[in-house]
Structure formats: structure tokens, C-alpha cells
Image (cartoon, helix red, strand yellow):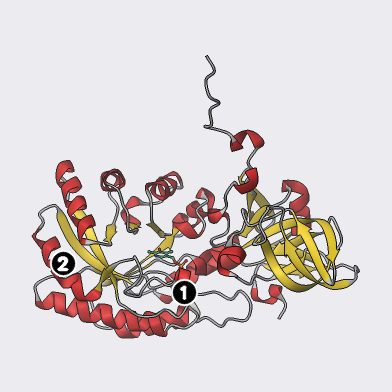
Amino acid sequence: MSGVEAFAHFSRRDGELCAEQLTLNGLGDQFGTPCYIYSAAALRDNFDAYTEALSGRDHLVCYAVKACSNIAILQLLAERGAGFDIVSAGELERVLLAGGDPAKVVFSGVAKTAAEMRRALEVGIHCFNVESAAELEVLATVAAELGLRAPVSLRVNPDVDAGTHPYISTGLKENKFGIAIDGAEAIYQRAAELASINVVGVDCHIGSQLTDATPLLDALERLLALVDRLAAQGIELDHIDLGGGLGVRYRDEQPPTADDYLSQVLTRLAGRPQRLVLEPGRSIVANAGVLLTETIYLKQSGDKHFAIVDAAMNDMLRPSLYQAWMALENAATSQAPEHCYDVVGPVCETGDWLAKERLLRVSPGDRLVLFSAGAYGFTMASNYNSRTRAAEVLVDAGRAHLIRARETLADLTRGEQLLGRD
Ligand SMILES: *Cc1c(COP(=O)(O)O)cnc(C)c1O
């Protein structure tokens, strides 16, 4: 299947791939490459799919900031009512800068520091997703010092196999995340005794890029059984947070839509008073963004054809890290001879590739488009090989907004110091 068919708002017109109404080649001329380009309409559609599926039910959709954390994207989602799932104080500051409502923020992560807790308590977040007994004690102390009560949900590990890549599977006992569901009741009891802790919910997040709802629904069943056991002990919860994890189509995957998935969730929640909280990341941004890159050289070595481009693993790590397959096409139709290419970047690592064994027509200077790049793309970028990080552009209908300037060479050494020689 051609990449573009799966990606609404990125379609070809007169041979030119477009983001909404603007050609990607035109955007490349304007902003340079490598460049991340996001579609505002795609972001809105993907977010609205969640809220529409949940209309009539008390809910909070907390976009997982780590998937793509540009403040303009957070702003766009905040304006549509999104809450946010954060994993660091840095992400909290982004949400606040973007105009996000702290009362709709949930704070996940296994290593929250006292300083991070303090800041989150001061701004009044919705909930801490506590991941260990030790964290609970520190949070209780920090909240007591501030004279506040910390709203808490325990992130439990329901011990279900998400059936996804081992690096993005988080719900098994052997993972570092969450509290084993068998031990959760004792920690809830402890939490209920602590004056500076307010027990409000339960949550889990079992993995990412799930293309089947079954593990998520299994996890929900285990959470509901726990909710009932806690209620029998006098601990009533206000919300159930199922985390994120819904997969997207990169190639030929057929993940459930938000609507399919949530209708099954709502059936299981019927008659229960708790608010449903979700933490989707990838399913909102992945297919709302592309990475635009320019071909620098073509090279043949034996039978092997390489297209060497100006984007690299430091810009987009997913292929190197997860052997991820992402659709890739020429931004314009080309008459160049067709070959089977490995598309590789300038970084000095054999693992530096964006796509392997792809039939392409490409000439030096042509721009190539890597699809599904919106999630875990820019946020995983680094300065490896002293490469400046790419620009980010948000297209909204016929307008392009530069939402992050390309880094400059001066940015690379900001904060570094030569040794004094006096
Ligand atoms: C990464 C993460 C998410 C988002 O996962 P997606 O697969 O991008 O939807 C949600 N919750 C937590 C705790 C996470 O770590």
C-alpha cells in the first residue's frame, strides 16, 4: 500500500505531496531540511476521536507529552480541552507555557524527585501516578511540608503481555514500571492512612503501539477487580486511568480505532461511577507528522544502492532503536530510474538508517518524506555528531507556522566552558 493512503491530510496533488494545502517541497524551500511538519487538522481529528467516543461519559483525555512536546502542539490540544500526562518537571513547564490547565495534569514516572513533586503540588496537578511504596512515602513528606494533600493514583502493573516490542512493553512483572497488582492493596491501605495523601484513583499503562485491544481490556478487567476489592475495604476511587498505548498504522497494521477500543471499554465500565482517564500519545500525533529530508548523494556499492539524506538517527531514532518500518516517498513524482535503496543519514554509525530496501525513484537534491514521524520523533532527537536539531513547522490549512526554529551552531556549545588557563 502506498504510504499516503493511510495518512489523511498528507496527500498528493499534481505529483506533489502536500501537508493540508501546502506542498512539502514548498515547505522545504521555506524552512530548509531536515524539518518536522505537522498537520493541525490531523491533530484535531485524532484528539477529537477520543472525546467524541467518550461523549456522555465523565472523562479526561491526558495527551502523553513525551510523544511530541512542542508547546504549540500542546497549546492546540489544550484549546480542545486536553489534559496532559507528564513524566518530568520539564514536561510540566511545557504544559504551563502552552496554557494547559494544571488541574488536568497527571504525573507518571518511576523516579519523580522531591523537587518535581513540590512544583507539581504547588501548581495543583490532578493526580500523581505513584509507581512504588518508596515514592508514596516521599510524596507524603513533601506534601506535608507544604501543608497540602497530594492526590494519588497507584500505577499498578496488571501483568498482561501487551504483545508489542519488548522496549515498549511495560505491563509485565519484570518491567520497572508500576506496582505489582498483588501488592497494590497493602500500599493503598498505607496511602489511606497518610494524612497528606488523598487516594483518588488507579492507573496502568501496559505498553505502546498495541494493535489489538485485548491486552488493554484484560488490564481493565484486572483493574476493575482491584477497584472492587478496595471498595470492600472502604477505599473508594474517583477515577480509573487506562493509560495510553493504542497503536497506529505505520505499514499494514490494523489497530482498533479510538472509537472501537473505547466502545469496548465503556461497555465494561457501565454502571460504574468512576471517571475514565486516558493517556494517549502516539495515536494522536504519529500520523499527524512527517519528517522532510533532502537527498545529498546517491551511492552504489556492489549491488547495493544508498540514498544518503540530510536527516539521521539523531533526528529520528525509531528505525535504529526499534527496527521500526516507516513509510517513505519522494515528495514529488520522479522519472529517475527505480532502484531498491537503503536510505541512510550522515551519522557515523552503521545503525544510522531511516528505511531499508525501498523501491524509489530519486535524484540528488530530491526531498524525501518519512511518514508517521509525529510521535517519538523530534522528542527523541539529540545533537549526536554535533548536528543541530531540526526545525518544526505546523501547517494549518493554507498557513505554515514555524513552531521551533532550527538550532544554530551557537546552540550546540551553549553552556560549555573552556578551561581557564591563568
Ligand atoms: C508513554 C506513555 C504513554 C503514552 O503511550 P502511547 O503509546 O504513546 O499512547 C502513556 N502513559 C504513560 C505512563 C507513558 O509512559
Question: Mark 1 — residue?
Answer: 246
Callout 1: CB less than 8 Å from ligand 1: yes
Q: Is 412 positioned to the left or the right of 226 in the image?
A: right
Q: Is 210 positioned to the left or the right of 314 in the image?
A: left
Which quarter holds ligand 1? bottom left
Q: Is residue 314 above or below residue 216?
A: above
**Between marks 2 and 1, how big is the CA–CA gap?**
28 Å
Name of the residue lying farthest toward the top: 422
Which label belongs to residue 16?
none
Nearer mark to the viewer, of 2 and 1: 2
Q: Position of residue 13 (x, y in %)?
A: 79, 68
Q: Please give the name of the residue rendered at 35% of the width and 75% of the height, measured from the top-left corner.
A: 172
Q: Is residue 416 above or below residue 56?
A: above
Q: Nearer the viewer, residue 47 or 374?
A: 374
Q: Position of residue 271 (x, y in %)?
A: 24, 82
> Label 2 sits on what residue type?
Tyr
- Characterize the local packing of mark 2: few (<14), some (14-19) or many (20 or more) Cα atoms within 10 angstroms: many
- Characterize the local packing of mark 1: few (<14), some (14-19) or many (20 or more) Cα atoms within 10 angstroms: many
Q: Is 207 positioned to the left or the right of 32 in the image?
A: left
Q: How many marks?
A: 2
> Label 1 sits on what residue type?
Leu
Instruction: Locate the N terminus and report the quarter of the image it occupies.
Output: bottom right
Image quadrant in which you'd find residue 221: bottom left
Q: Position of residue 117 (x, y in %)?
A: 27, 48
Q: Position of residue 188 (x, y in %)?
A: 16, 67
Question: Mark 2 — residue?
Answer: 188
Q: Please give the name of the residue rendered at 46% of the width and 57% of the height, measured from the top-left corner.
A: 66
Image quadrant in which you'd find residue 242: bottom left
Image quadrant in which you'd find residue 155: bottom left
